Image (cartoon, grey):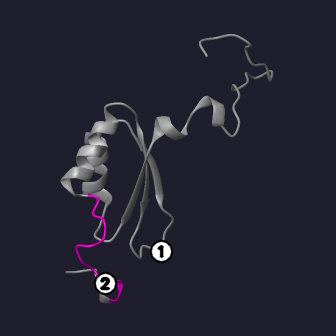
Amino acid sequence: MSTRREADEWGIETPNIMLPEKLAAIREVLEQSPIIVEHWFYYGSRAPDRLIFDGYEDFEAHLSKHANPGDKIYIWRFDALCRDDNALTSGKYPDSDGLVPKKGCY
């Protein structure tokens, strides 16, 4: 059973996330950095999932289990976007007295 809406002009011209060269690029990046994935659902009337993967097998498993024809997948390199110098904010979690350490492993 197809979920295609013909008005959406299905074809081979639109980028396909499952093309071997795209999957190879994703696999290569995952050897260097985690990826951030935004998974939009085709006419799913729900918010997109936003996930982080640090292994290709987990990413592949997500697609095989949760992706459906027409879903849009955006992918970014984690290390290119999430750096200490561009964080919205940061801080350490306090103890029961509201105190945080000045020193520590980070």
Residue 96 disc label: none
Where does residue 53 sit, x and y in percent of width and height? 38, 41
Residue 45 disc label: 1
Front-most of residues 99 and 57: 57
Position of residue 48 in the picture relative to residue 103 (left or right) = left
Quarter occupied by residue 15: bottom left
Instruction: Point out the image quarter for the N terminus.
Output: bottom left
Residue 43 within the magenta-colored segment of the rendering? no
- CA gap, disc 2 and disc 1: 20 Å
Instruction: Point out the image quarter for the C terminus.
Output: top right
Where does residue 74 sit, x and y in percent of width and height? 42, 56
Residue furthest out toward the bottom = 7
Residue sitting at x 37%, y 36%: 54
Where does residue 21 sit, x and y in percent of width and height? 22, 51
> Up-down: is 18 above or below 30?
below
Q: Which residues are magenta?
A: 7-17
**SS of the residue at dot 2?**
loop
| Amino acid found under the numbered disc labelled 2 | Glu
| Amino acid found under the numbered disc labelled 1 | Ser
Residue 14 within the magenta-colored segment of the rendering? yes
Crowding at mark 2 (Cα within 10 Å: few <14, some 14-19, many 20+): few
Where does residue 46 sit, x and y in percent of width and height? 49, 69
Quarter occupied by residue 19: bottom left
Residue sitting at x 40%, y 68%: 41
Quarter occupied by residue 99: top right
**SS of the residue at dot 1?**
loop
Q: Which residue is mark 2?
A: 9
Residue sitting at x 40%, y 36%: 34
